[in-house]
Image: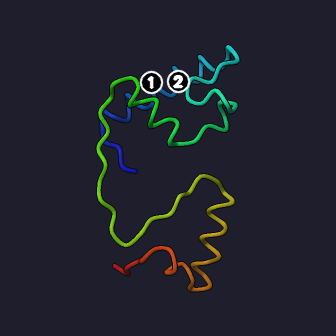
Amino acid sequence: MKFKEPATKIIRAFYRKTQNLSRENKNPLNPNLPFRLSYMTDFLQGLINEKYKLKAVLIENGWLELDSIHDYNIYNKLYQQEKISNFIKIEDE
């Protein structure tokens, strides 16, 4: 994902707002999860529900979902084993 100003200010404010609401034992992003376990897709849907406009961009060469240090460690291991190309094409600059 890529965010530019002033969107980053909006995102930070929305995060604080939803975090504060979650302190009332209600996760406004996903009522089935504790706030700290919300998914990025929950957050993005929350922004959409608040009438913020998001723009999708076509991604070529594949992509990876990186939600945790566990994901990072898996992808790093695959990269070191030269197997990451099974999932994403990484071009040398």
Q: Residue at x 50, y 63 (%)?
A: 64
Q: Residue at x 41, y 30 (%)?
A: 47
Q: Residues within 10 Å of mark 1 (few under 14, many from 20)?
A: few
**Residue lying furthest top in this view?**
24
Q: With respect to residue 46, does 93 lie above or below?
A: below
Residue occupied by mark 1: 13
Residue 21: quadrant of the picture:
top right
Q: Is residue 50 left or right of residue 64?
A: left
**Residue lying furthest bottom in this view?**
82
Q: Is residue 66 left or right of residue 61?
A: right
Q: Position of residue 58 (x, y in %)?
A: 29, 59
Q: With respect to residue 47, does 80 lie above or below?
A: below
Query: How far apart in space, not on screen, are marks 2 and 1 (Cα)?
Result: 5 Å
Question: Mark 1 and mark 2 in contact (Cβ < 8 Å)?
Answer: yes
Instruction: Please tell me whether mark 1 sits on a helix, a strand or a loop.
Output: helix
Residue occupied by mark 2: 16
Q: Position of residue 34 (x, y in %)?
A: 70, 31
Q: Residue at x 64, y 26 (%)?
A: 31
Residue 55: quadrant of the picture:
top left
Closest to the observer, 20 or 65? 65
Q: Position of residue 14 (x, y in %)?
A: 46, 25
Instruction: Please tell me whether mark 2 sits on a helix, a strand or a loop.
Output: helix
Query: Three-letter amino acid code at disc 1?
Result: Ala
Query: Three-letter amino acid code at disc 2?
Result: Arg
Q: With respect to residue 40, does 12 lie above or below?
A: above
Residue 25 bears which disc, if any?
A: none
